[in-house]
Image: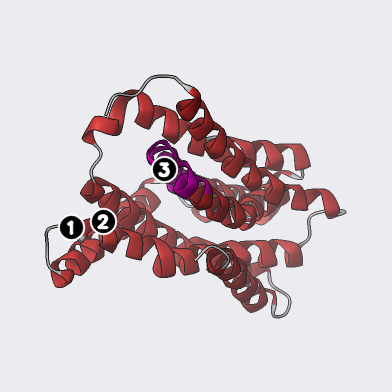
Amino acid sequence: MSWSVDSTVLMAMGVCIAAALSTVLGSLSVLVTKQPSPRLLAFGLAFAGGAMVYISLVEIFWKAEAGFAGGVTARTAYVYATLAFFSGVLMLAMIDRLIPNPHALMSSAATDSHHIRRVGVLAALAITAHNLPEGLATFLATLDNPAVGISLAAAIAVHNIPEGVSIAIPIYYATGSRRTAIVATCLSALAEPVGALIGYLLLAPFLTPAVFAWVFGAIAGAMVFLALDELLPTAKRYAQGHETVYGMVIGMAAIAVSLMLFK
């Protein structure tokens, strides 16, 4: 396939940008909160954890299996997807060992602020890593079939909104700055058009369904590890009631509804 910068390419990039902007909509949740509070933080972290676990196990893992399915048995595809998933778990576990936990270095309110900032940054990085292949997939799908690409982008846009909430609330709590929270979310949102641009300029000839499958499987594992190791325990720490379980369930439900709308 020979591509040039024509109307189809521009439309594909526009579709990616539109899907990415919905992440920023989620970050605007910080504008309606008067000030950071432990209960809001607990809810926001649990929301992020629930959303990450649900989308990883219900959607992203199965994208990985589907990517491996061509040319191998269903059992082998599942085995490969499982290996990719746990490679993502192992990758994030190693990163977690390399990044010092602020609780070992500080105490009191400074510890809390640094810890929440670290959790927020890790959540933003995980979602950014998730957005890169999504942007690339949307771009390539739109180039191949605009109707399919636009449908995919609409589905991604809907579930990008809770992802924006997931990034903005912990960063807002850590910094006290709405502007910082929104800017951080914007940077994460940029991953989708950046992924599309990288794919268009450099990677498209080398990307196969199996490569996508490994990427999606590893991202699913990394997001589950982050949710269980950082987001949910930290949410529980700041909860004063049932904010953790409510946030987790509502985060799962938000992603579930976004997926159901476009099945």
Residue 162 image position (x, y, % from top left): 63, 58
The reply to whether the C-beta atoms of the residues labelled 1 and 2 are less than 8 Å apart is yes
Q: In the image, is residue 148 part of the stretch drawn in magenta?
A: yes
What is the three-letter code of the residue carrying label 2?
Answer: Gly
Q: Residue 164 in the image: x percent, y percent?
A: 63, 50
Say which of 114 and 153 sits in front: 153
Residue type highlighted by circle 3: Asn
| Most common SS among magenta residues | helix
Query: Image quadrant of residue 20?
Result: top right
Residue under pointer 2: 67
Residue at 69% in and 80% down: 242
Identify the residue under disc 3: 145
Residue 205 is left or right of residue 33, and the answer is left
| As drawn, 202 above or below 23 | above
Among all residues in the image, which is located at the extreme top? 5
Q: Is residue 102 visible?
A: no
Q: CA distance from mark 2 to mark 3?
A: 19 Å
Query: Within the magenta stretch, is there residue 193?
Result: no
Q: Quadrant of the N terminus?
A: top left
- Count of numbered marks: 3
Q: How is the image coloured?
A: secondary structure
Task: Give the magenta-colored segment's residue range.
Answer: 125-150
Type of residue at label 1? Gly
Residue occupying the point 37% across, 54% down: 219
Q: Quadrant of residue 80?
A: bottom left
- Mark 1 lies on a secondary structure that is loop
Residue identifier under label 1:
70
Q: Mark 1 to mark 2: distance in Å?
A: 7 Å
Give yes or no for contact between labels 1 and 3 (Cβ–Cβ under 8 Å): no
Q: Which mark is residue 18?
A: none
Classify 169 as above or below 57.
above
